[in-house]
Image: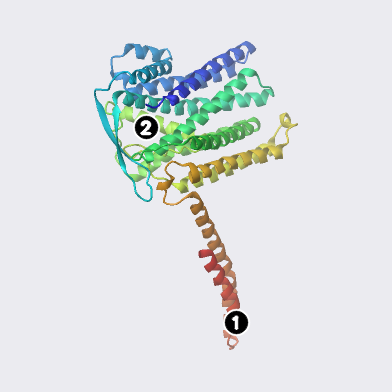
């Protein structure tokens, strides 16, 4: 049975970040910074409450007679209790013989174009561990993007304003960044397992390393850009955040309304229509929060019974990173023109260049992951390199077509002039130009 390392990582980040936030808020209170204390506590306790509700919802404990579990969640100790429960199940799994098992069928990755179907027996203990892993994965995503991401942005903003960094603030920023990167990593793994549910997916260690580097550069540069822009244009950053948030929040609903599908009723049998609406609203809120800082990997689709789109939309991925790169560049340029005296000793052009290179580095690691380390790359209809070469051929062909319109227009003008004068056009003059044009088009199209 697989060791529940993901559960241990989730609980460690949850407890460490919460304790660091409580300590930092006490230092703000001692210093008389009431506003920083309130915001630090809010971005710590709000995701804690959402994590407790998530664990209760996934395990369906609200409809079961488990008063001790409910009490632990009310005391904000639910993750610790669940973690102890997970390790008790794991330690007892080898000692007790499973009286009942279920059989699952998974297809292996194709070899030489052939894919075999493998049957696997899953005992009750392994099934319980799978449920716990799934619950903690979702809780980690909520903790990361509804708590750690705004917490990291807040503490970095305070550091820039005060031009001083304390030990407590440094610790919580490191923990918050690790929490966000881990949450993004869980999004990637969840997206892979959902899209290729019928296959046995095995993620290699190098794939985890590549995803970690990809997400680290992407999230770190995004947070720094937002903090720099906020430090000089505090009012306009509200507009940027609201436009980003509502664009991603409303996008799944717009697609749902355009599809004409009925309102989903099968999310959870115990939920009413109002409860289903609340759950869907929370999911779109989380979806918007993720895309504010990085690519979500999991695409929300409300008209789908599973609420997740299984199709791999490369164009949406390309558009997202192109738009995000342009947005980061514009925000950095505005910061450069409106920067204040607190950046007197900062080489602004060099900082802008470093941030843009850092974001491009994240895109590079993403391409490396999809090209070499994706566990299901054999199922892709085309690889990243093939898609990139096809895009270059398309650009080359379109540029050649644009260039070909100018000589052809000039040839038509010469023909008309010759006709008006009653003269025959010379074919020796026209043939070389036309031949060079169509030769270039043929080379680009091939």
Let me know if residue 337 appears in the view: no
Q: Residue furthest left?
A: 99
- List x then y, in percent, for residue 427: 58, 83
Q: Which residue is mark 1?
A: 417
| Numbered badge on residue 340 | none
Q: Position of residue 118 (x, y in %)?
A: 30, 39
Foreground of the two, 350 or 94:
94
* Residue located at (32% from left, 30% from top): 276
Q: Quadrant of the N terminus?
A: top left
Q: Is residue 340 above or below residue 79?
A: below
Q: How many marks?
A: 2
Contact? badges 1 and 2 (CB < 8 Å):
no
- The type of colouring in the image is rainbow
* Residue 343 placement, left or right of 422: right
Give the residue at mark 2.
280
Instruction: State left or right for residue 215 relative to residue 74.
Output: right
Q: Is residue 58 above or below residue 351?
A: above
For marks 1 and 2 on the same chain, the one whose residue lies earlier in the sequence: 2
Q: Looking at this view, is 420 or 222 the one in front?
A: 222
Q: Quadrant of residue 437?
A: bottom right
Camera-side mark, 1 or 2: 2
In three-dimensional space, the C-alpha distance between marks 1 and 2, rounded to whole angstroms, equals 68 Å
Q: Secondary structure at mark 2?
A: helix
Mark 1 surroundings within 10 Å by alpha-carbon count, few (fewer than 14), some (14 through 19), many (20 or more): some
Which residue is pictured at 26% across the width and 32% down the height?
103
Where is residue 318? Give x, y as percent: 50, 47
């Amino acid at each position: 049975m697989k060791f529940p390392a993901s559960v241990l990582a989730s609980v460690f980040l949850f407890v460490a970040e919460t304790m660091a936030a409580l300590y930092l808020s006490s230092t703000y209170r001692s210093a008389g910074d009431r506003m920083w204390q309130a915001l630090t506590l809010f971005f710590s306790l709000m995701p804690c409450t959402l994590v407790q509700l998530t664990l209760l919802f996934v395990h369906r404990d609200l409809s079961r007679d488990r008063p001790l579990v409910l009490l632990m969640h009310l005391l904000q100790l639910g993750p610790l209790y669940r973690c102890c429960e997970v390790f008790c199940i794991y330690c007892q799994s080898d000692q007790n013989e499973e009286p009942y098992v279920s059989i699952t069928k998974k297809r292996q990755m194709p070899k030489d174009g052939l894919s075999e179907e493998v049957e696997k027996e899953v005992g009750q203990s392994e099934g319980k561990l799978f449920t716990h892993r799934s619950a903690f994965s979702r809780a980690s995503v909520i903790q990361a993007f509804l708590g750690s991401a705004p917490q990291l942005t807040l503490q970095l903003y305070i550091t820039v304003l005060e031009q001083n960094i304390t030990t407590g603030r440094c610790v919580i920023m490191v923990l918050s960044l690790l929490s966000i990167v881990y949450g993004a990593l869980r999004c990637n793994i969840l997206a892979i397992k959902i899209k290729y549910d019928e296959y046995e997916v095995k993620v290699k260690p190098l794939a985890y390393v590549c995803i970690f580097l990809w997400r680290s550069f992407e999230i770190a540069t995004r947070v720094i850009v937002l903090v720099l822009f906020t430090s000089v244009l505090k009012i306009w950053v509200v507009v940027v955040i609201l436009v980003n948030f509502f664009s991603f929040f409303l996008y799944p609903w717009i697609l749902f309304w355009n599809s004409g599908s009925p309102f989903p009723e099968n999310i959870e049998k115990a939920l009413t229509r109002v409860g289903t609406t609340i759950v869907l609203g929370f999911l779109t809120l989380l979806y918007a929060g993720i895309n504010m800082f990085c690519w979500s990997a999991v695409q929300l689709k409300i008209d789908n019974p599973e609420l997740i789109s299984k199709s791999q939309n490369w164009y949406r991925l390309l558009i997202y990173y192109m738009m995000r790169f342009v947005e980061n560049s514009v925000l950095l340029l505005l910061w450069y023109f409106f920067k204040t005296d607190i950046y007197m000793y900062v080489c602004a052009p060099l900082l802008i260049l470093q941030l843009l290179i850092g974001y491009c580095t994240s895109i590079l690691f993403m391409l490396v992951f999809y090209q070499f380390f994706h566990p299901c790359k054999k199922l892709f209809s085309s690889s990243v390199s093939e898609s990139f070469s096809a895009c270059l051929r398309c650009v080359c062909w379109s540029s050649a077509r644009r260039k070909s319109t100018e000589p052809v227009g000039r040839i038509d003008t010469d023909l008309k002039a010759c006709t008006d004068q009653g003269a025959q056009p010379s074919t020796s003059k026209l043939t070389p130009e036309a031949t060079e044009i169509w030769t270039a088009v043929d080379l680009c199209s091939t």
